[in-house]
Image (cartoon, coloured by chain):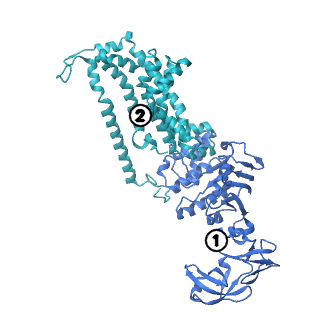
Amino acid sequence: MTQVTLSGLTKIFDEKSPPAVDQLDLEIESGKLTALLGPSGCGKTTTMKMIAGLLRPTSGDISFDGDSILSIPPEDRGAVMVFQNYLLFPYMTIAENIGFGLKMRKVDRKEIRTRVTDMLDLVQLPGFEDRKPRQLSGGQQQRIALARALIVQPNVLLLDEPLSNLDAHLRDEMRELIRRIQTEMGITTVFVTHDQEEAVVLADRIALLFDGRLQQFDVPDAFFESPQSVEIAKFFGGTNFIPGHYEGGEITTSIGRFRAPRSAVDGGDAVLSIRPEAVTLGAAGGNSVMGRIRSHVYVGRYARFRVTLGDIEVEAVTDPGQVKMFNDGDEVPVTFDSNKIWVIGPAAAHE
Amino acid sequence: MADTRIEPTAAGAGGVAPEDKERRFSWRITGRWVGITGLLAFLVAPIVPLFIWSISFRWFYPAILPTEYSARAWTEVITPHNDVLGVAWNTALIALVVTALSILLGVPAGRALGLYEFRGKRLVEWMILAPIIVPGLAVVLGIHVLFIRAGLSNSIPGVILVHLVPTLPYMTLVMSGVFANYDTDFELQARSLGASRWATQRLITLPAIFPGVVVGALFAFIISWSQYVLTLLIGGGQVQTLPLLLFGFVRSDPAIAGALSVVFILPAVIVLLLSSRYLSGDNAAVGGIGNI
């Protein structure tokens, strides 16, 4: 159980370009599964390599349980990284691969053998000891790579895009395996991903990074219910943003005034955001305005409408049955559920 | 990997389809045979007439084989007063030291050129290639003056140093090809799993680059072993090697020259045959087509 603290962590590869990681402060909770999420090139893997000791930070500090570990070489940190492309050593058998870390720790051969067998059971590949890495499928290699990291009982487990090279059905199995092992062993785990769905499903907490800077560090549902900026909301699939003025729990926009008790700002210029699922069509009431249906798509599990409200267009995701009730061009009342409206600071203020 | 279905008890090849594996297997066999046949044709066949020369006493046109045989040439080669074996040992010693130094210098240089971008990299590449492009005689005349001043001429260390001029480019080029296809993340992975710097070099890097080192070392050994001009000029006749000895006999006594040639060629052929598996098939390292 190890708490990892990053403070002011910065990595500059090239003086001429912006930092790959910029003044990153992060408290990674002990025994929890934390996701580093962001588009490719946002500095996630760089951050992970710095925690593992494989890259030297330009400035800032990393500490495990309060003690700085910057001067400790990677082999003594107890932070084991599993690379995206598995990197099983091609000249060794599966047993030698998994036992590698123990051999480096001078554990005796008999004990290595029993622990390798236990690990193969844990990742559900019993009897694979004598195979060579190239005889294994991608999913199997991934499990072996995981076993090879877990066998040394690391303080911190670092997984770089653990699911990205797998097919969809293998991804679910692997996700469950990671979750199960992580819960059982209680290892502080950090994983890197560019897929927000993967982060939401797997992580206890998500650190969202854009361009090497931390945007928001929160539990998964917070990114849907209370994103701190328009960009964050967009990254998590938000589509409806209406600029306006916020005051006293109400936001005034070009299409009307809406009650909005939940807000990231106290007042002033702001943006009304509402997820398409929280926009309802047809029923008039509070927080309603009239709109005109511009187009619709029937997806099966749901239907997606595009509705024009004055000079603004919003998206609504509704029950699929609603495609029969409305035609394109119909005038309909559009309701924003006031508890689902989230008021964000103006987009310009963020940059 | 084409087949990613998880089968904990999958029989045989796991992810690799059987016919795929067979095809690769037969390619390896074919490659090895082409390699071995080539080696025999170009390296072993020329020794045959030399060997016949060495045991002939009379051999004139139009006879296909000598009319009279004699062991005289071989007796001359073996008798101590000609010191052929001593010279052969000397030549081997020089070639081995040259090879060792080439590995020591060429592997790190090849790594730097194959893996990293740095200022002046093109220039360094040209400098390394220069000894292959510029005629050796021109280079060695300049070096000779320097070596006389440094007291290195007419000595074995001097000969070893000058042999590095043609061997290092080959070693460096082969290694830079190997490293261009090498993923340093393997080293990082080993470090992360608890391996020290030294253990990583020994257990991860060395096995991956080994075929390349063998090929480069082979070049270095053979270039040094068969060096004539550089040894003659820098050794100044004081350092005797087989090529110098051989040259002396070519005009005066073809039978002894034949016997010496056999002695001269054999080590190279043996080394080549022993390492032929690194020149063909899966482990081919020349030109950096090795797998990692």
Q: Which chain is blue?
A: A
Position in image of residue B4 (x %, y %): 49, 58
Q: Is residue B147 left or right of residue B37?
A: right
Residue drawn at 43 percent across, 28 percent down? B223
Residue occupying the point 33% across, 40% down: B34
Residue pointed to by mark 1: A237
Label 2 secondary element: loop
Residue B62 lies, with reference to residue B192, above or below; the image says: above
Task: In this rendered view, identify the residue nearer to me: B120 or A346.
Answer: B120
Colour given to chain B in the rendered image: cyan
Q: Which residue is mark 2?
A: B275
- Which residue lies at the image location 65% right of the left edge and 42% below the top edge? A75
Chain of the residue under label 2: B
Number of other residues with Cα within 10 Å of mark 2, as a class: few under 14, some 14 to 19, many 20 or more: some
Say whether residue A246 is left or right of residue B126: right
Q: Chain of mark 1?
A: A
Q: Position of residue B24 (x, y in %)?
A: 38, 48
Q: CA distance from mark 2 to mark 1?
A: 59 Å
Badge 1: few (under 14), some or many (20 or more) residues near its Cα, within 10 Å? some
2 and 1 marks in contact (CB < 8 Å):
no
